[in-house]
């Protein structure tokens, strides 16, 4: 079957399933054929192998069922780096790059990333702060396996990963900078999330407890024990959580500020010890 026909059939299967069926069909075929989207566009009359065709239609089926594109390809770009992802880790989002940008401006010789997931924050910081020592913790061994793979793939030997239940354990060491994009969705709201999120991404990385604030409370209470005097704590927060997290942070932190995303939503909240 030629490329143009494959795109047409794939787009038909994705109709009413995704926002732009033709674009996604091209992306999926480019992944299956291991070529660029530009190649797909200019070589529309070329045939593909039977193996490629089979992989393509399987990927189209997965996408039509709601599987995120990043899980189909097994990778996601974040802060100019490529990260392996699977169903054990949350897919890195562009909003989280705001947290990385702030953390780089804050700096620090010793950095801790709490709830590291895929390791995207820790690895991005380690890559851009080569003289710093970065530690990253997560409760999920499966997530840490992916994070370690990402650190190695991106050539970062200044980052270490540890399995820790932050709700009951204290990470070792003292740090100049602590960052976290913790689970922050209210438990009652989980069922209202988009299908490709709630049915495919790990609940462990989404569930922030009854009010979505359990990890913020714990980390803010824990930070004074492991953050150096004058050190910085920075969070990613949900679209409606600024006031609540601010109230939690002000008990132990000063110089509290925020960074907005492109939509003007307060997305990063930070303070100094």
Image (cartoon, helix red, strand yellow):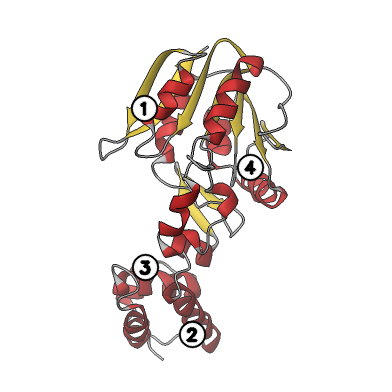
The disc placed on residue 243 is 1
Q: Nearer the viewer, mark 2 or mark 1?
A: 1
Q: Nearer the viewer, mark 2 or mark 3?
A: 2
The disc placed on residue 25 is none
- Tell which of 184 and 144 is nearer to you: 184
Helix, strand or loop status at disc 3: helix
Up the image or down, 194 lies above or below 270; here it is: below
Task: Point out the tag, 1 or 3, that comes first from the N-terminus.
Answer: 3
Q: Residues within 10 Å of mark 1 (few under 14, many from 20)?
A: few
Task: Point out the tag, 1 or 4, that comes first from the N-terminus.
Answer: 4
- Tell which of 39 and 7 is nearer to you: 7
- Residue holding disc 2: 53
Task: Point out the tag, 2 or 1, that comes first from the N-terminus.
Answer: 2
Can you give x and y, in whole percent of width and height, for residue 256 in the image?
40, 16
Q: Residue at x 73, y 30 (%)?
A: 169
Q: Residue furthest bottom?
A: 1
Up the image or down, 144 lies above or below 200; here it is: above
Q: Residue at x 70, y 50 (%)?
A: 145
Q: Residues within 10 Å of mark 3 (few under 14, many from 20)?
A: some
- Residue holding disc 4: 151
Disc 2/disc 3 C-alpha distance (Å)? 16 Å
Task: Point out the tag, 4 or 3, that comes first from the N-terminus.
Answer: 3
Q: Residue at x 45, y 41 (%)?
A: 79
**For residue 51, side relative to residue 12 (left or right):** right
Disc 4/disc 3 C-alpha distance (Å)? 28 Å
- Residue holding disc 3: 37
Q: Nearer the viewer, mark 1 or mark 3?
A: 1
């Amino acid at each position: 079957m030629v490329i143009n026909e494959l795109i047409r059939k794939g787009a038909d299967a994705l109709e009413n399933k995704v926002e732009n069926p033709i674009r996604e069909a091209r992306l999926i075929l480019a992944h299956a054929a291991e070529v660029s989207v530009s190649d797909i566009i200019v070589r529309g009359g070329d045939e593909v192998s039977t193996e490629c065709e089979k992989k393509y239609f399987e990927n189209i089926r997965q996408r039509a069922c709601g599987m995120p594109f990043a899980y189909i390809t097994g990778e996601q770009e974040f802060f100019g780096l490529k990260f392996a992802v699977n169903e054990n880790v949350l897919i890195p989002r562009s909003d989280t790059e705001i947290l990385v940008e702030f953390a780089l401006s804050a700096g620090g010789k010793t950095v801790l990333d709490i709830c590291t997931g895929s390791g995207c924050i820790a690895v991005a910081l380690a890559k851009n702060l080569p003289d710093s020592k970065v530690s990253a913790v997560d409760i999920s061994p499966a997530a840490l396996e992916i994070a370690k793979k990402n650190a190695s793939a991106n050539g970062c030997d200044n980052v270490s990963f540890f399995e820790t239940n932050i709700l009951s354990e204290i990470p070792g060491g003292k740090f100049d900078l602590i960052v976290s994009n913790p689970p922050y969705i209210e438990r009652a709201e989980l069922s209202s999330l988009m299908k490709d999120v709630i049915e495919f991404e790990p609940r462990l990385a989404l569930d922030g407890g009854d009010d979505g604030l359990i990890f913020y409370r714990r980390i803010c209470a824990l930070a004074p024990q492991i953050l150096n005097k004058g050190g910085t704590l920075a969070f990613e927060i949900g679209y409606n959580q600024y006031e609540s997290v601010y109230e939690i942070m002000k008990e132990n932190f000063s110089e509290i500020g925020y960074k907005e995303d492109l939509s003007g939503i307060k997305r990063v909240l930070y303070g100094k010890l």
